Image (spheres, rainbow, N blue to C red):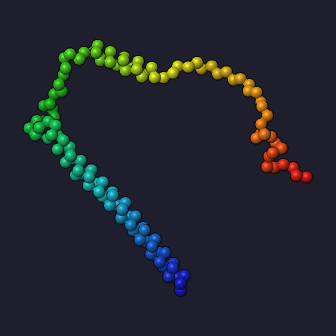
């Protein structure tokens, strides 16, 4: 009888965990759906009102052009950025030289001190 009650208690605990998990997942999906369906259009509308005013349309807004900023200035800026980014890397020789190291005796590499020595 005790085993049966323990089994039922464990089984009901599993169902509680299952129901809680499913509720959390589906409520999160529902919340995301509501945010994407109603929240984003509202935020975009508010952004349009703040950025350009309520009476203007997007097509009526023209970007401000600075006449003093020419192509030569843009080219000079891009070359300076390119040179700055390439200066940070080291250009090293790709030739590798391998030298033979002297083998000094070390008790750590000695086989007589190993764990699997012959004891006979």
Residue drawn where x is 67% and y is 21% of the image: 97
Residue drawn where x is 77% and y is 30% of the image: 103
Q: Residue furthest top?
A: 72
- Picture layout, residue 70 above or below residue 17: above
Residue drawn where x is 33% and y is 57% of the image: 29
Q: Residue 32: x percent and y percent?
A: 30, 54
Residue drawn where x is 43% and y is 68% of the image: 17
Q: Residue 111: x percent and y percent?
A: 82, 42
- Quick check: 66 left or right of 80? left
- Picture layout, residue 71 above or below residue 25: above
Q: Between 81 and 24, which is closer to the camera in this rendering? A: 81
Q: Residue furthest left?
A: 55
Q: Between 49 and 26, which is closer to the camera in this rendering? A: 49
Q: Residue 74: x percent and y percent?
A: 29, 18
Q: Between 88 and 48, which is closer to the camera in this rendering? A: 88
- Quick check: 82 left or right of 66? right
- Quick check: 37 left or right of 86? left
- Picture layout, residue 2 above or below residue 88: below
Q: Residue furthest bottom?
A: 1
Q: Quadrant of residue 63?
A: top left
Count of residue discs: 0
Q: Residue 4: x percent and y percent?
A: 52, 82
Q: Between 86 and 103, which is closer to the camera in this rendering? A: 103
């Amino acid at each position: 009888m005790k085993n049966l009650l323990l089994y039922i208690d464990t089984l009901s605990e599993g169902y509680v965990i299952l129901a809680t998990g499913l509720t959390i997942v589906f409520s999160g999906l529902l919340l995301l759906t509501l945010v994407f369906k109603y929240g984003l259009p509202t935020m975009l509308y508010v952004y349009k009102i703040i950025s350009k005013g309520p009476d203007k349309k997007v097509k009526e807004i023209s970007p401000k052009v600075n006449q003093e900023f020419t192509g030569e200035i843009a080219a000079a800026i891009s070359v300076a950025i390119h040179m700055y980014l390439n200066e940070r890397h080291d250009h090293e020789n790709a030739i590798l030289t391998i030298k033979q190291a002297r083998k000094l005796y070390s008790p750590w590499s000695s086989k007589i001190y190993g764990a699997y020595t012959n004891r006979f």
